[in-house]
Image (cartoon, helix red, strand yellow):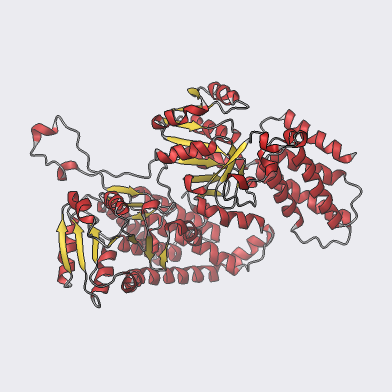
């Protein structure tokens, strides 16, 4: 069936290029669907099929970015004047706009890195959490700019972030892996904290790997700046007021959601960090204070 | 030839301005206030628009950017120069967009329209710059007009050093209310003394205190009103040294901290970026050269600025009204275009 093929296509994309953000892989899959789909006869039908496909992809990979990226893609391609009477013409326009969208967001990681690396001073000690490809890009650009700094990475159980430490060592950046529990201990030595985000919510807070909230509270207590780096397709229309408000479909891995009946027994994979603990967010839309996020979000989704 | 004369005249004026900027920022306080710097920069940019040779909006923006880079390089700590250049660039973009209509047009039509509308564009840009100059002239008055809403009778107000804006603010309130002002002298330049003299001439009861006494006196203060050199993009301040102390003391006593700053002081810089921050001047104000013996054994610094984080600030009063620090990002997006942030 077409949907099975698409999920396979998505999985291959992610496997072939581990550097690509999962949202970009999802959007490529949706574009493929647009090109292959023969059954749609009306634009409304097409939209519904696309929404169905996004649901399927969410079941394959439950990260927030796939959900927000998918929705933004859908809005970007369908909110244009599709006045052509012929459906295949409309589809062509949609595919073109889809390609444009894809091109724009492939560049977003470099834009973020360009903005952020000036905030890393020579001799800085940076603490980061788990393995984030955007943070890696930022540290790469800072290293390329001939800055000297050291990095502490948290081990980040249950699926440890050993890979982050290896990649940094390859770039000749001195790196130390610390236990998740040692964050409070190491905070006094550190100059700044940089984390990635799986999703950025309307209040200006972030959804990220479990342990980020702890990190933020600690850095606030020690008065260290807490920076978040995220691409704009991670902006999601949620407004959680506390940890319980984050929808369950994001909290656990896709396989867990399908297999387990009583989710209260499972350990969540992500947590929510409120905006009061965040100093600045670096996105491809610019450097934002948490209060500026909701404005930018509305502009994206309008 | 009149054309060549005009160009030589323009270059001369720009050079004179740059030399003035380089000299102007010495430690005994600004020789010129930031308001005057802003006005001179804008007038100079207007002259450049009127007299330089350009044939399209893109050309004009390149010329202005070039001059802007030279001016900011002359005195990097004087951010109003850069701010005015960014305002003018935004004006050019707006006038260009308006003359082409707000619809999206293709590239071919772009080049045509650029030539056609050239004359109108020039006139429009110069008119808009004139409006900007009128706005600049009225900023201190606009801020002072809001004084009566914020200062009540029998209040004790604290301020630091000397700010022309705060002086006008307090003098305006003094016309109708009776209140007491405590001025921290702000060593080592002690500009607070001049401020106190000016305020007492306007019949305001003034007391001068040493910087070390700020915390001790803070419990008796109702409001703290300060000026600043720059307002940063995250809502923080780059103000005269000693301001962070006042802000922390005010936070401890839950005293509101009000900043009077006109819009031309708003800058798109962030505080943690490299090289945006400090300026050091001759340390002889702190430890005079006559103390030769000590000088060889000790490091003496005399920083000019202080950073105040946005959490310590209650309200910004500017010529367009009162705003919270978390709203600064919005004002910035209205005044400047994001592509111009790096000159």
* Residue displayed at 14% across by 30% down: B296
Q: Position of residue B132 (x, y in %)?
A: 42, 68
Q: Is residue B178 left or right of residue B265?
A: left
**Is A151 rendered above or below residue A213?**
above
Which one is nearer the viewer's eye here, A146 or A278?
A278
**Residue B267 sits in which quadrant?**
bottom left
Which one is nearer the viewer's eye here, B282 or A124?
A124
Q: Is residue A79 left or right of residue B87?
A: right
Q: Position of residue B27 (x, y in %)?
A: 22, 49
**Is A77 rendered above or below residue A108?**
below
Q: Position of residue B65 (x, y in %)?
A: 46, 53
Residue B315 seen in render: yes
* Picture mark count: 0
* Residue displayed at 39% across by 31% down: A188
Q: Position of residue A134 (x, y in %)?
A: 58, 36
Pick the quarter of the image with the N terminus of chain B: bottom left
Residue A21 seen in render: no
**Residue A119 sits in which quadrant?**
top left
Which one is nearer the viewer's eye here, B297 or A247?
A247
Which one is nearer the viewer's eye here, B148 or B127?
B148
**Is A19 rendered above or below residue B107?**
above
Q: Is residue B321 left or right of residue B109?
A: left
């Amino acid at each position: 069936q077409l949907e099975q093929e698409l999920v396979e296509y998505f999985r291959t994309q992610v496997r072939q290029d581990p550097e690509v953000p999962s949202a970009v892989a999802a959007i490529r899959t949706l574009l493929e669907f647009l090109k292959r789909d023969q059954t749609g006869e009306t634009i409304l039908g097409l939209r519904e099929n696309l929404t169905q496909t996004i649901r399927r992809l969410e079941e394959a990979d439950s990260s927030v970015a796939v959900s927000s990226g998918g929705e933004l893609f859908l809005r970007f391609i369908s909110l244009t004047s599709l006045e052509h009477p012929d459906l295949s013409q409309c589809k062509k326009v949609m595919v073109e706009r889809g390609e444009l969208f894809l091109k724009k967001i492939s560049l977003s990681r470099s834009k973020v890195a360009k903005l952020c690396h000036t905030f890393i001073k020579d001799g800085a000690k940076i603490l980061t959490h788990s393995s984030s490809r955007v943070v890696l890009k930022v540290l790469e650009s800072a290293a390329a700019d001939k800055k000297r700094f050291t990095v502490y990475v948290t081990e980040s159980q249950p699926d440890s972030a050993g890979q982050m430490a290896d990649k940094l060592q390859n770039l000749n950046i001195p790196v130390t892996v610390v236990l998740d529990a040692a964050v409070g201990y190491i905070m006094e030595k550190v100059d700044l904290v940089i984390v990635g985000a799986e999703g950025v919510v309307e209040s200006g807070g972030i959804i990220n790997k479990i342990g980020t909230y702890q990190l933020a509270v600690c850095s606030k207590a020690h008065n260290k700046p807490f920076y978040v780096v995220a691409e704009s397709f991670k902006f999601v229309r949620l407004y959680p007021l506390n940890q319980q408000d984050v929808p369950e479909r994001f909290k656990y891995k896709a396989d867990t959601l399908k297999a387990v009946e009583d989710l209260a027994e499972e350990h969540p994979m992500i947590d929510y960090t409120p905006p009061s603990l965040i100093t600045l967010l670096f996105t491809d839309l610019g450097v934002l204070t948490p209060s500026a996020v909701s404005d930018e979000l509305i502009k994206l989704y309008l | 030839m009149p054309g060549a004369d005009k160009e030589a005249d323009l270059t001369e004026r720009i050079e004179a301005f740059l030399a003035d900027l380089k000299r102007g920022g010495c430690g005994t306080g600004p020789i010129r206030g930031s308001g005057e710097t802003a006005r001179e920069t804008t007038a100079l940019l207007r002259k450049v628009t009127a007299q330089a040779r350009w044939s399209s909006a893109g050309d004009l923006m390149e010329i202005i950017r070039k001059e802007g880079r030279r001016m900011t390089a002359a005195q990097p700590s004087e951010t109003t120069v850069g701010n005015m250049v960014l305002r003018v660039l935004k004006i050019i973009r707006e006038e260009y967009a308006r003359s082409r209509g707000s619809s999206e047009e293709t590239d071919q039509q772009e080049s045509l329209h650029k030539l056609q509308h050239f004359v109108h564009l020039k006139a429009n840009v110069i008119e808009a710059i004139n409006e900007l100059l009128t706005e600049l002239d009225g900023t201190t008055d606009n801020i002072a007009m809001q004084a009566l809403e914020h200062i009540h009778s029998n209040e004790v107000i604290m301020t630091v050093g000397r700010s022309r804006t705060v002086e006008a603010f307090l003098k305006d309130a003094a016309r109708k209310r009776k209140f007491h002002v405590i001025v921290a002298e702000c060593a080592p330049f002690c500009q607070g003394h001049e401020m106190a003299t000016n305020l007492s001439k306007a019949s305001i009861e003034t007391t001068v205190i040493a910087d070390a006494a700020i915390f001790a006196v803070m419990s008796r203060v109702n409001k703290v009103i300060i000026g600043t050199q720059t307002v940063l993009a995250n809502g923080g301040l780059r103000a005269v040294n000693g301001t962070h102390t006042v802000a922390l003391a005010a936070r401890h006593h839950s005293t509101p901290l009000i900043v009077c700053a006109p819009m031309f002081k708003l800058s798109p810089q962030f505080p943690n970026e490299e090289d945006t921050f400090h300026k050091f001047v001759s340390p002889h104000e702190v430890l005079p050269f006559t103390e030769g013996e000590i000088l060889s054994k000790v490091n003496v610094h005399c920083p000019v600025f202080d950073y105040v984080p946005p959490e310590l600030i209650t309200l910004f009063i500017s010529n367009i009204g009162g705003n919270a620090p978390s709203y600064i990002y919005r004002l910035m997006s209205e005044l400047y275009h994001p592509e111009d942030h790096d000159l």
